[in-house]
Image (spheres, rainbow, N blue to C red):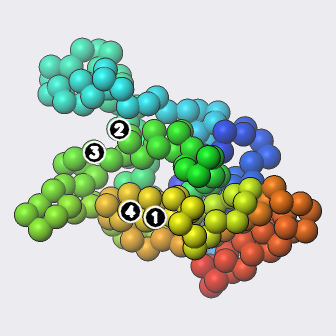
Amino acid sequence: MNILQINASARREGGNSTRIADAIVARLQAANPDARLTVRDLATDPHPMLDEATLSALFTPAEQRTPAQAARVALDDALIAEVQVTDVLVLGVPMYNFGIPAQLKNWFDAITRAGVTFRYTESGPEGFLTGKKVYVALARGGRYRGTENDTQTPYLKLILGFLGMTDVHFIYAEGLNMGPEATRQGFAEAEADMAAALA
């Protein structure tokens, strides 16, 4: 089993979403001692954003790219290769201003490539990153689960499903900035979600 853990917290250390993602991975490794783990921390190793130069490189045929364009596309290729060989994807996702972190959006932009990880067909889009299990560790200062203010869950379901990843489990730690008791409750709820998702 290949496990890919993506930490999207802007914090290099002490991120609550990373803490939950680490706990998910620890349980997966306990149940699968031979599992191989790759960790990509987007705080310590941020991926460049999708800009005009990147679009130009991606839309230039490989044999016509400049060395700089080839190097930029290779950065995205490396992320695509990682997720292609992954059996289990674990995402650590904090909520920043009601959305996902910019660094995670950059990661999704890098791995979402027509003809490689998805294609459009007459009956709609078809994702190629199939057969994977996904665990999403969500950490929020307030409580948004199941409300219209939770923009993260619908977006993540959409983008993951678009790429072919439909076996997705969400683990929520909420209320983490609402006082000590709310924090304790938030992590307890995350533990319950984890137990159910990994049963």
Which residue is at the front of the view, 159 or 196? Answer: 159
* 10 Å crowding of disc 4: few (<14), some (14-19), many (20+): some
Mark 4 lies on residue: 158
State which mark lies toward you, 3 or 4: 4
Q: Which three-letter amino acid code belongs to the residue tagged 4?
A: Leu
Residue at (35, 22) in percent of width and height: 71
State which mark lies toward you, 4 or 2: 4
* 10 Å crowding of disc 2: few (<14), some (14-19), many (20+): some
> Image quadrant for the C terminus?
bottom right
- Distance between the Cα atoms at labels 1 and 4? 6 Å
Q: Which mark is residue 77?
A: 2
Question: Which residue is outermost to the left?
Answer: 122
State which mark lies toward you, 3 or 2: 3
Rendering coords of residue 119 (x, y %): 19, 55
Q: Which mark is residue 154?
A: 1
* 60 horizontally vs 164: left or right: left
* 10 Å crowding of disc 3: few (<14), some (14-19), many (20+): some
Mark 2: secondary structure: helix
Residue at (74, 56) in percent of width and height: 141
Kindly tell me whether residue 143 is visible in this rendering: yes
* 10 Å crowding of disc 1: few (<14), some (14-19), many (20+): few
Mark 3 lies on residue: 113
Kindly tell me whether residue 22 is visible in this rendering: no
Q: Tag 3 or tag 1, which sits nearer the N-term?
A: 3
Is 80 located above or below residue 31 in the figure? above
